[in-house]
Image (cartoon, rainbow, N blue to C red):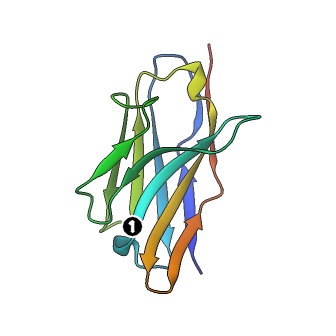
């Protein structure tokens, strides 16, 4: 079955770095655009970064541009989010998302999330 398993979250001090990973299985990873979303307590889930299926195109929210980098390894069925210069406002549960548009509609898969806490 389809699985997206995030890892790499944790507690980090402001200004620190973390690298999130999302391991995919159960579908053809290289066919899907991959994204990272996050949801802070009391807030809506927001899109953080997206990478195209082949990895040639990336997009970032204004709040993380210049600090976060999304990448993927299609040979390992894994997408990453390198987070640098972390701020307390980056505290959230981070979710991995796989999305593909087909003639039948949209395939859309989610991971279970990993907690990132930025605090001194």
Residue 16 location, x and y as percent? 46, 21
Q: Residue at x 40, y 69 (%)?
A: 32
Secondary structure type for disc 1: loop
The residue that appears at 57% across and 76% down in the rendered structure is: 2
Could you tell whether 41 is left or right of 101 in the image? right
Q: In which quarter of the view is residue 61 placed?
A: top left
Residue for badge 1: 77
Total numbered labels placed on residues in the image: 1
| Residue 30 at x, y percent in the picture | 34, 72
Question: Does residue 108 appear in this view?
Answer: yes
Q: Residue at x 37, y 31 (%)?
A: 65
Q: Within 10 angstroms of label 1, few (less than 14), some, or many (20 or more) residues?
A: some
- The image position of residue 55, as x and y in percent, is 27, 58
Q: Nearer the viewer, residue 23 or 109?
A: 109
Q: Is residue 2 above or below residue 15?
A: below
Image position of 17 (left or right of 97): left
In the image, residue 19 lies at what x, y percent? 44, 39
Relative to 74, 83 lies left or right: right
In the rendered image, the vertical position of residue 28 relative to residue 34, given as above or below: below
Query: Among all residues in the image, which is located at the extreme top?
Result: 120
- For the point 49% across and 49% down, the residue is 36
Closer to us: 7 or 48 = 48
Q: Residue furthest left?
A: 56
Picture layout, residue 114 above or below residue 25? above
Give whichever of 10, 118 is nearer the camera: 118
Quadrant, the C terminus: top right
Residue 26 appears in the figure: no
């Amino acid at each position: 079955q389809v699985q997206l398993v995030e890892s790499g979250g944790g507690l980090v001090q402001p200004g620190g770095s973390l690298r999130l990973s999302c391991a995919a299985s159960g579908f053809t990873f290289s066919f899907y655009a991959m994204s990272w979303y996050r949801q802070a307590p009391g807030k809506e889930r927001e899109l953080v970064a997206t990478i195209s299926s082949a990895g040639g195109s990336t997009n970032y929210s204004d709040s993380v541009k210049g600090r976060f980098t999304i990448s993927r390894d299609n040979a390992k069925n894994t997408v990453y989010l390198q987070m640098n210069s972390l701020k307390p406002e980056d505290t959230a549960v981070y979710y991995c998302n796989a999305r593909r548009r087909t003639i039948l509609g949209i395939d859309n898969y989610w991971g279970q999330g990993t907690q990132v806490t930025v605090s001194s």
